[in-house]
Image (cartoon, coloured by chain):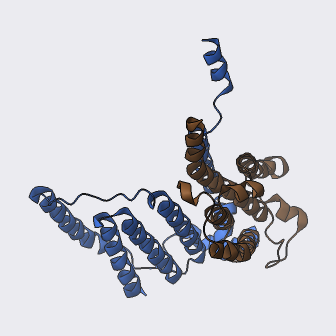
Amino acid sequence: METFIGVMIFFMIIGALVALEARDLLSSIISIATVGFLLTISFLYLRAPDISIVQGVVDILTLVILIRATISRDVHFFEDEREFFPFAAIIVMIALFFVFLFETVKFLPAFGTNLSKVATYYLGQGLKAAGAPNIVSAVILDFRGYDTLGEAMVLFTAILGATVVLRLTPKKGKKKDEAKK
Amino acid sequence: MNEQNEQGMSEIVKMVCRIIEGFIFLFGLYIVMFGHLTPGGGFAGGVILAGVFVLILLSFGKERLNNVISDKAGSFLESFGALVFILGAAAGMLIMNSFFANYTNRLIGSMPFRFLSSGNILIYNIAIGIKVMAELFVVIYFLSVTHILLKKRREK
């Protein structure tokens, strides 16, 4: 399974690089969506169907919105040659990243090792304590309710700000001021 | 949305949309309602429900979407879902002296693997589902409709 996920991550990195280097916006959006779908499959193989559903659905929705936003713009990037020093710096940084990554991976615990004490409690007592057969749901809405509350409020505030900025009807007080002038 | 697509897409797309929109909405409702039994939950189901409105907006244009749900109704549902979530959590302070207490589980009593087995989780899932659906609908509505209306207003 680890090799499968490694292959998935390899293709995801390729998709992200294609998205960066693509000449027009539509193809880079499509390759970003490919990254999302590969991530969905990886989550399924990691036996996390909840987060897999969320990832797939959000990926589809953002793909539709982004295509809708960019397809009428028809923006093309200008072709110009790469300068040497930034490119060399990128290559050096990538090489350094992988060197330190492999040094760090040696000290990580093996994949799937049970290190978290509290997770053992949730898996053992979750059904009895919360009553929900879906342990993920029990954790995010019962044991860790504050996290979900914070996440919901973040989304709520973001949409609130967007609706305030994009509203159609102006403020009531402002109109009166303009009329007085 | 650009100008020529304001009336929606072709007749084939409209027909397919008419057939499948109900099924997608039902699937979203299922994901929300059975979030405590099967994979899924409020957020995933809410995004699927919002996807139905995006489908209607893209295939029919904004006229039919306004018949289904208006932006004011979306704002109301968004606030309503958030309020139900917070009040449902805060009611635990009155009943069991702790925020986010699972009080309905104790009051009703539960059999595992039944629909009403998990008490408050079902309420929170439905509230989050409504909230996420309305939020994503509102942001898509504003992003795709506002600049058209503003352009028309400027032309007048």
- A81 to B13, vertically: above or below: above
Say whether residue A107 is visible: no
Write down which chain is painted brown.
Answer: B
A25 relative position to A136: left or right: left
Q: Residue at x 67, y 71 (%)?
A: B14
Number of labels in the image equals: 0
Residue drawn at point x = 37 percent, y = 62 percent: A25
- In this view, the residue in front, A77 or B150, is B150
Q: Picture coordinates of residue A57 (x, y %)?
A: 58, 70
Residue B20 sits in quarter:
bottom right
Chain in blue on the image: A
Q: Estimate the x, y position of residue A121 in percent, counting from the top left.
A: 62, 71
Q: In the figure, A113 relative to A86: above or below?
A: below
Find residue A164 and report its horizontal and vertical position in percent: 60, 38
Q: Is residue A136 visible?
A: yes
Residue B150, quarter of picture? top right
Residue A66 vs residue A150: left or right?
Answer: left
Q: Which residue is situated farthest in the front direction here?
A: B156
Query: Viewer-proximal residue, B96 or B154?
Result: B154
**Quarter of the image that includes the C terminus of chain B:** top right
Q: Residue furthest right?
A: B108
B93 and B23: which is toward the camera? B23
Q: Is residue A55 above or below residue B72?
A: below
For the N terminus of chain B, the quadrant is bottom right
Is B55 or A56 nearer to us in this picture?
A: B55
- Tell me which residue sits at (63%, 59%) in the image: B7
Q: Quadrant of residue A85?
A: bottom left
Residue A21 at x, y = what percent? 28, 66
Judged from this view, the residue extending furthest toward the top is A181
